[in-house]
Amino acid sequence: MLRPASIDPVAQLRAERISARDNEDPCASLCTVASVDRDGLPHARTLVLRDVEEQLAIFGNRTSPKWQQMPEGTVVAVVVWLPSLSLQYRLRCTTRPVADHVVHASWQLRPATPKKLDWLYTHHQPQSTPVTDRAALLSLLESLDLPEPLIAPDTAAGLFLTPQVVERLDLNQPDGVHDRRHFERTDRGWLESVLVP
Ligand SMILES: Cc1cc2nc3c(=O)[nH]c(=O)nc-3n(C[C@H](O)[C@H](O)[C@H](O)COP(=O)(O)O)c2cc1C
């Protein structure tokens, strides 16, 4: 029951995230990204969902487990929940690296502590690895030798997310029956079908 879509669902997501931002929605700039490790175990985490060169993107560190789980071309599942609009988007996306110079320019806008952490991951311990305790972590952060001027380490990275499948669930229906639509990207443009909610 797929038919040509009446709307580009990625453009719709973009417009609705802007509306959510206008509503000061705490989730407007966030998403949950799920990936699968080498043993087939699923992992999900909250990430900032960025708009880079008019595409969706996420930024992180190459030392982190998630980066190992998302090499170029991998399929990841992404969820965006916008409570102020009662909308859920579920995306199936392929990944593609963001050019390092774009990541490094954006990295300069990060607060001081995440910048330091990126250097800690690079020279001392990969992200997501255990430390003796919090005090040891804080003291390691304090003792870091940072480059002057402070630039991004090579481990700072970004991935474009290209939605191939989009599902939009709109809870905002006067009759109480949620509106659930499935979209698939094809060579002929987006196709759409209505799903049982
Ligand atoms: C609101 C919020 C935003 C976050 N944004 C990012 C982000 O943009 N990039 C990132 O690497 N981690 C971000 N994190 C931390 C991740 O959720 C996660 O804890 C971390 O990246 C380690 O994940 P991993 O072990 O799966 O690699 C964010 C966490 C929260 C709660």
Image (cartoon, helix red, strand yellow):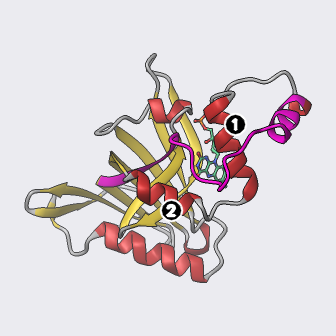
Mark 2 = which residue?
A: 105
Mark 1 = which residue?
A: 120
Under mark 2, the amino acid is Ala
**Left or right relative to 155: residue 4:** left
Residue 40 makes an appearance in the image: yes
Local secondary structure at mark 1: helix
Which residue of the protein is positioned furthest toward the top in this rendering? 39
Quadrant location of the C terminus in the rendered image: bottom left
Whether label 2 lies within 8 Å of ligand 1 gets the answer no
Report the residue at 22% width, 62% height from top.
192
Number of marks in the rendered image: 2
Under mark 1, the amino acid is Leu
Badge 1: how crowded within 10 Å, few (<14), some, or many (20+)? many
Which residue of the protein is positioned furthest toward the right in this rendering? 135
**Left or right relative to 21: residue 89:** left
Q: Which disc number belongs to residue 61?
A: none
- Residue 89 image position (x, y, % from top left): 44, 59
| Residue 176 in magenta stretch | no
Local secondary structure at mark 2: helix
